[in-house]
Amino acid sequence: MEREDVAQLIRSVLIGKFCVREAINQFPHNNEDESIQAAYHALVHFEADEDLRRRDALYKEEQDSYLMMIAEILDKGEDLPFNIINSYKEFYKSANIPNGNDWKGKLKSFFKMLNV
């Protein structure tokens, strides 16, 4: 079920219903699913590439297609391809998905940020 929820969040970003930050805040908390973590990183990169997306229509189109492909795979409940997962693992130990807004979640996020 969580993969389908993430797929919907990605689609909501692509159609402009949510900004990336809103979608990220709704990601499943404390999730160890590598496919969900890769989707998280793909959205973070989507946001980071905002200026490039404005300047390069072909890049924007390719990135939108890439995110839509991720959403379609997750919507089926399937694992993302190994190469997609590994492309993000090269740079990140794990996704820094927010842990919730209560004090326990904030404490977990704080320690995760410190890499403890």
Image: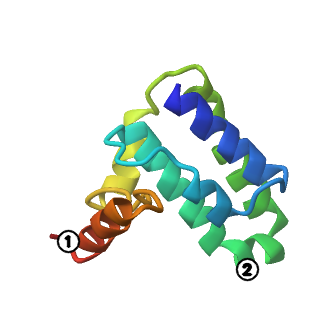
* Most foreground residue, 41 or 28: 28
Side (left or right) of 27 relative to 110:
right
Q: Secondary structure at mark 2?
A: helix
- For label 2, the crowd category at 10 Å Cα-Cα, with few meaning under 14, some 14 to 19 and many 20 or more, is few
Q: Is residue 43 above or below residue 86?
A: below
Residues at circles 2 and 1 in contact by the CB criterion of under 8 Å:
no
Residue 91 appears in the picture as rendered: no
Residue at the image point whose x is 40% and y is 57% from the top:
99
Residue at the image point whose x is 84% and y is 65% from the top:
57
* Most foreground residue, 74 or 115: 115
- Residue indicated by mark 2: 51
| Rendered image: mark on residue 115 | 1
| Rendered image: mark on residue 88 | none
Q: Is residue 89 above or below residue 111?
A: above
| First along the sequence among labels 2 and 1 | 2
Q: Secondary structure at mark 1?
A: loop
* Most foreground residue, 96 or 102: 102
Residue at the image point whose x is 30% and y is 56% from the top:
94
Residue at the image point whose x is 65% and y is 45% from the top:
66
Side (left or right) of 86 relative to 76:
left
* Residue ranking furthest to the left: 116
User: Residue 23: x and y, percent?
Assistant: 64, 55
Q: Spatial distance from mark 2 to mark 1, Cα to Cα?
A: 30 Å
User: Residue 35: x and y, percent?
Assistant: 43, 38
- Three-letter amino acid code of the residue under disc 2: Asp
User: Residue 74: x and y, percent?
Assistant: 56, 30
- Three-letter amino acid code of the residue under disc 1: Asn
* Most foreground residue, 5 or 38: 5
